[in-house]
Image: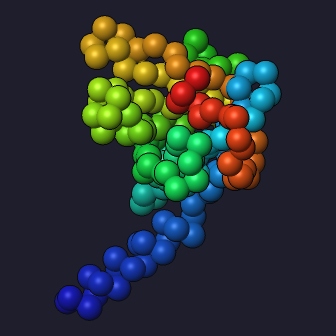
């Protein structure tokens, strides 16, 4: 029985990995200027449903190639009013980059639209409402650290 459970677990794990769609990108601001950070997001499904689970990491968070934080979330419909220059399904991604208390434990939420290649960043208002922290477009591929550039969360 134990062997069967282990085998089923492996099949499910490899099945999830095989069905994942990976987005690996660097942010740009609204003017098209490249920023130093980005996200690697894996969009996958659980069971027989559609691809709605998101897992990955925010890289180069402080324009320091050694810094990365794990992120996760869901893909779902988000009203156009909350997106930057986009419509339709969006990856809703929670990011603990500011959640470690270093910056007061401020929550960060990304809305990343894979069709329009746009993003918008919301900061928590600690119960008083979220504020937009930045927005722009993104390009495929990881970029090297650029001197003089800032991270999307530092704009």
Say if 106 sits above or below 64 in the image: above
Residue at the far top in the pictured view? 128
Nearest to the observer: residue 20 or residue 1: 20
- Residue 117 appears in view: no
Q: Which residue occupies 34% across, 14% down?
A: 125
What quarter of the picture does the N terminus occupy? bottom left
Residue at the far front in the pictured view? 147
Specify the color scheme.
rainbow
Determine whether, in the image, residue 112 is placed left or right of residue 1.
right
- Residue 19 appears in view: yes
Residue at the far right in the pictured view? 32
Q: Where is residue 118 drawn, in percent x and y? A: 68, 30
Q: So how many labels did they put on this image? A: 0
Nearest to the observer: residue 112 or residue 1: 112
Q: Where is residue 63 drawn, in percent x and y? A: 59, 43
Q: Which residue occupies 26% across, 82% down?
A: 5
Say if 30 sits above or below 1 in the image: above
Q: Where is residue 76 drawn, in percent x and y? A: 51, 34
Determine whether, in the image, residue 111 is placed left or right of residue 7.
right
* Quarter assignment of residue 3: bottom left
Q: Which residue occupies 79% across, 21% down?
A: 31
Q: Which residue occupies 70% across, 35% down?
A: 148
What quarter of the picture does the C terminus occupy? top right
* Quarter assignment of residue 73: top left
Say if 57 sits above or below 138 in the image: below
Determine whether, in the image, residue 25 is placed left or right of residue 76.
right
Say if 31 sits above or below 116 in the image: above
Determine whether, in the image, residue 118 is placed left or right of residue 128.
right
């Amino acid at each position: 029985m134990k062997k069967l459970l282990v085998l089923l677990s492996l099949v499910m794990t490899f099945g999830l990995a095989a069905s994942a769609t990976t987005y690996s990108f660097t942010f740009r601001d609204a003017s098209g200027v490249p920023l130093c950070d980005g996200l690697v997001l894996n969009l996958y499904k659980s069971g027989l449903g559609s691809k709605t689970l998101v897992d990955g990491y925010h890289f180069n968070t402080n324009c320091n190639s050694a810094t990365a934080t794990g992120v996760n979330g869901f893909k779902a419909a988000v009203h156009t009013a909350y997106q930057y220059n986009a419509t339709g399904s969006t990856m809703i991604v929670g990011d603990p980059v500011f959640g470690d208390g270093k910056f007061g434990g401020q929550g960060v939420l990304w809305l990343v639209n894979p069709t329009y290649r746009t993003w918008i960043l919301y900061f928590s208002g600690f119960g008083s409402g979220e504020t937009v922290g930045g927005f722009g477009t993104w390009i495929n591929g990881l970029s090297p650290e650029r001197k003089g550039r800032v991270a999307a969360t530092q704009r």
